[in-house]
Image (cartoon, rainbow, N blue to C red):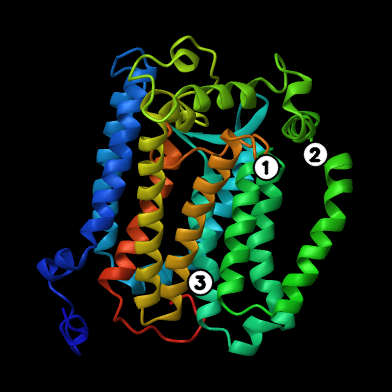
Amino acid sequence: MTASALTRPGERARLPVKIGEIDWRLTLIISILAGIGAVMLYSVGGGSWSPWAGAHLTRFGFTLVIMLVLALVDIRVWFMIAYPAWIMALLLLVGVELFGYTAMGATRWLDIGPLRLQPSEIMKVAVVLALARWYHGASAQDARFSWKLIFPIGIIMMPVLLVAKQPDLGTAVLIVLTGGSIMFVAGLSWKIIAAAVAGAAVAIPPFIAFVLHDYQRERIMTFMNPEADPSGAGYHILQSKIAMGSGGVFGRGLGLGSQSQLEFLPEKQTDFIFASVAEEMGLLVGLVVLGLYLAAIVISLRIASQSHSHFGRLAAAGVTATFAYYVLINGAMIMGMAPVVGVPMPLLSYGGTVMLTVMIGFGLIQSIRVHRYTELPRGRGLI
């Protein structure tokens, strides 16, 4: 497909042309990962489609349709809704602060009719859109070093403060990492990056000592020495390591994992599902899963590089960064290389809002692929 076929002056690409421009390799990889997740949820659910596997497949089917529909949405629509989406997500976070639903000691959800929504997940995509929109209209000098950087910093930090207060440290860290990645790709000065790293290094000890909740501080101490309390704070990490190690190269077999089937492994359907994969399917399948994640990331970054608009490049790169950080943080967490912060493994873990957010993100990436030749104005107006 040539550029002229999608950008002929005065015409919009026809629907069959747009469908043909969807990256079906990426769609297939996403589907395989969700399928592996369903198989694993079936196994840890005692060989039953309920309570997790059937719901997981249903949610994926529904969100897959959403992704394909969003892939056909003109990139100019994404461009136009970038700031309103961020404002709406911020208002939802304020709503959580005022009217949120509390569970397990955290207030992270809003009950909207029959739905229970986690606005912090929506904010992950909204921050990417808003930052991509701002940098699209910024000059190279403003992006590198300028007082105007207060605007993208505000776009990142305002929701981070609200999310951290819920408390949800994992999501807050994800938003900071994603936002920082977009600022780096947009051309942020190395001096600012070095100063930020140095400032963070200085601020971490007092932040841990005086800002974190007791259970968050305990998680960090446990990460440093989980054997100190093997039946208490260190239980999650130690059981995860046992599960991963016991699977060997080829795994113990579906339904035969001692840690997951005998309820030793906590949160086996969400945060620690990859440990269940390693135990029951083995190292080889675990490496295949990681290879599929890597392939999805590489394809998404290639889509970002092909976009003719700065907005498209940054938006696709930002969504890809969020997805990559999900995988990296969860993988490090279950191997005991990072504190347990409640970050799921995307497409494998059970969870509705996370699945929806990830698939909306891939819908945006696919839209950027379909409309990669579309040029966007450099102004910052909402319309």
Q: Check disc 1 and report its element: helix, strand or loop.
A: helix
Report the residue at 47% width, 52% height from top. 323
- Check whether the beta carbons of the residues at disc 1 and disc 3 lie within 8 A of each other: no
Please report contact status of discs 1 and 2: CB closer than 8 Å, yes or no. yes
Q: Which mark is residue 217?
A: none
- Residue 114 in view, yes or no: no
Mark 3: which amino acid?
A: Ala
Question: Based on the displayed image, in which of its 4 quarters is residue 148 positioned?
Answer: bottom right
Q: How crowded is mark 1: few (under 14 residues within 10 Å), some or many (20 or more)?
A: some
In space, the residues marked 1 and 2 are separated at their CA atoms by 9 Å
Task: Determine whether 242 is above or below 46 in the image.
Answer: below
Residue situated in front as seen by the camera: 368 or 41: 41
Measured as percent of width and height from the top left, residue 146 is found at 72, 83
Asked if marks 3 and 2 touch (Cβ < 8 Å), the reply is no
Give the residue number, with chain letter if any, for mark 3.
132
In the picture of the structure, the residue carrying the numbered disc 1 is 169
Disc 2: which residue: 212
Task: Identify which amino acid the numbered label 2 is placed on.
Answer: Leu
